[in-house]
Image: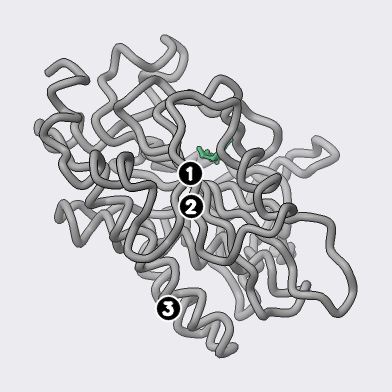
Amino acid sequence: MASNSIDTDDLVWQQIRQHQALEGRKVFFFQEVDSTNTIALDLGKNGEPHGTVVVAESQTMGRGRLGRKWESPPETGLYCSIIIRPEIAPEDLSKITLAAGVAVCAAIETETGLKPQIKWPNDILLDGKKLGGILTETGALQYGETPLVVIGIGLNINTGLSSFPAELSKKCTSLSIQTGRQHSRGIILKEIINTIEQNLVVLQQKNFEKIMQQFKKRDAIAGKELSWVTIQGNIVPGRSLGIDGHGVLQIEDKEGFVHEVVSGDITLTQK
Ligand code: BTN
């Protein structure tokens, strides 16, 4: 189906675009931007309030974790960033990515019946392939002040295989590839935002346990053999023991030593 006809069908998306609003939130809607996260950080620094959303039909410099590029072909995916001002301690900020990840999975499940999983800390997978990702970034943190945080979400919704660069086409998927039908980006965006907001309330109530339970149900790597590539580039083969009560990934290496992982990259060696 041509992208125009998808958009004609997606009335909620059209409403968000025309009214620049979504359930009482301000939405900044763009045809093309470099990165919705960059725009959202700038808007946040200029005082836009908690809950403001930035959406784009495409991005020229969409970015992912660890400096990776996020492919953002026009008018088929969801590329959005939410400005939040969470009342949580700086040491708990990394939990926001996990809370957003489980919210995105739950929203997709509600709207499509599919059951996406999370590869710690931010990859959304379906059928072992990358469906989406979360990139959480912060403005400059000032001691004692409520932080400015941007939650960036990239999701392949109606993206066809041919839209992915050749080297990614075996590793990536989209909702439409999985179901064989088109999905409403507007309805999915609405559900994602509501579910993220609920999970932020849970975090602010210091109830990470509840997020952790949701995460464990959707954990794509628990118990699996993997390689942890540290920020320094060292490779540690091991097995995931899942996350602890702070959202820190536990990896048991071949000698039985348990590493507490807060950064770096995970590559599964077992499906
Ligand atoms: C990842 O997989 O490492 C995270 C990908 C996050 C991509 C989204 S798309 C909207 C927002 N703007 C960006 O530049 N990145 C995030």
Mark 1 → mark 3, Cα distance in angstroms: 33 Å
Say if mark 1 contacts mark 2, CB within 8 Å: yes
- Local packing at callout 1 (Cα closer than 10 Å; few below 14, some 14-19, many 20+) is many
Write down which quadrant ligand 1 falls in: top right
Q: Nearer the viewer, mark 2 or mark 3?
A: 2
Helix, strand, or loop for circle 1?
Answer: strand
Task: Establish whether ligand 1 lies closer than 8 Å to the Cβ of label 2.
Answer: no
Q: Is residue 223 at all visible to an observer of this figure?
A: no
Q: Residue at x 28, y 41 (%)?
A: 127
Q: How far, Cα to Cα, is label 1 from label 2?
A: 6 Å
Looking at marks 1 and 2 on the same chain, the residue that comes earlier in the sequence is marked by 1
Image height check: is 154 above or below 86? Answer: above
Q: Secondary structure at mark 3?
A: helix
- What count of labels does the image hold? 3
**Which dot marks residue 28?**
1
Q: Residue at x 24, y 45 (%)?
A: 15
Image-based side of 36 in relation to 44, left or right: left
The residues bearing labels 2 and 3 have C-alpha atoms spaced at a distance of: 27 Å
Residue at the far right: name it. 143
Q: Quadrant of residue 217?
A: bottom left
Crowd class of label 3 (few under 14; some 14 to 19; many from 20; radius 10 Å): few
Amino acid residing under circle 3: Gln
Q: Secondary structure at mark 2?
A: strand
